[in-house]
Image (cartoon, helix red, strand yellow):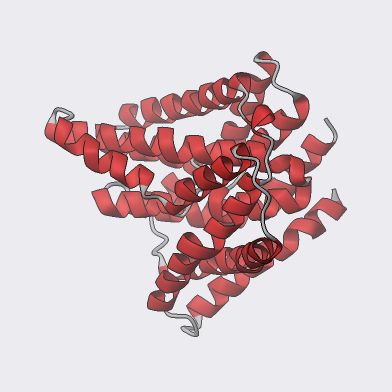
Amino acid sequence: MLAIFLKTLPFFALIGTGWLAGRLRLFPAEATAWLTRFVFYFALSAMLFRFAATLDLGTLFDPRFVLAYLAGSLAVWALVFALARRGGAGTADAAMQAHTAMTGNTGFLGVPMLVVLLGSAAIGPVLMVLTIDMVVFSTLITLIITAARHDRIGARMLLPLARGIVANPMIVSMLAGLGWSAARLPLPVPAAEFLALLGGAATPGALFAIGASLAHSPARRIGPAVGLSAAKLVLHPAAVGAAAWAARVDPAAAGIMVAAAALPVAGNVYILAHHFRVAEERVSAAILLSTAAGIATIPVAIHLITKG
């Protein structure tokens, strides 16, 4: 347990360094935005392409894995949505809270950290979780909020939504890498070294950017955010784990799925909340609280996974 904690500590130390730099104004909000763009469009995309290009496509897609993750995540989504509605929240607000409770920071934190901690076997399952979160649940929250505001879902909004998914550099880089793998093309040595060099900047850059962005985000409405953070860090991995057990998912893949579900709330959830002007303060506070609490909860989750 202590060994796992010490392995995860450097990742959170990088987040803390970014937060301190932001709080001391050594790294202003504008710089954070540009660093995030660099990581999102270049470093993380290079890492994802390199990972995907080396995958065995025959073992990547497991229907039971996908169904288990969808079932567990949707159960948490539905529960939080129902509780929020019962508490008086509107449809859009309740949907954003539900989205917050089951969308982990898989891209910026999960991919670099879980691959280091759990080995190369984590690459396929983590990429699958990332894809489901970006394609299925990001689409779901967009459709629900749009329908709640306009009382309908028009054909005009579907094309921009599809464009947004296709233009996402993380999705594009993963698809390109999988296409490369499917063609059974070897990566030329200069290209592999370039991708490794550029992708190597993803881990420190992403973690530093997470911390700096937290320093610039207002942390209000802490009370309601506690429940969302608990749902994300405890309820979501428990629900996903139960679904994986019921679906008889391969234990190694199931463990990685649970580890991904145990990640703190993703920063891009706040981007969505800010874009739609829905539950911004709750989402911002949940990101801060879950990231801080993750220092203690993630090592516990990984310890339990490694113990079977």
**Residue 104 visible in rendering:** no
Where is 185 relative to 257, above or below? below
Residue at position x 56%, y 76% from top? 20
Residue at position x 46%, y 83% from top? 25
Between residue 65 and residue 280, name the one nearer to us: 65
Q: Position of residue 261 (x, y in %)?
A: 60, 38
Between residue 237 and residue 114, name the one nearer to us: 114
Left or right of 186? Residue 80 is left
**Residue 113 visible in rendering:** yes
Dividing the picture into quadrants, the one containing residue 122 is top right
Q: Position of residue 62 (x, y in %)?
A: 63, 24
Left or right of 127? Residue 173 is left
Figure disc tally? 0
Dividing the picture into quadrants, the one containing residue 179 is top right
Where is 14 relative to 247, above or below? below
Residue at position x 39%, y 28% from top? 83
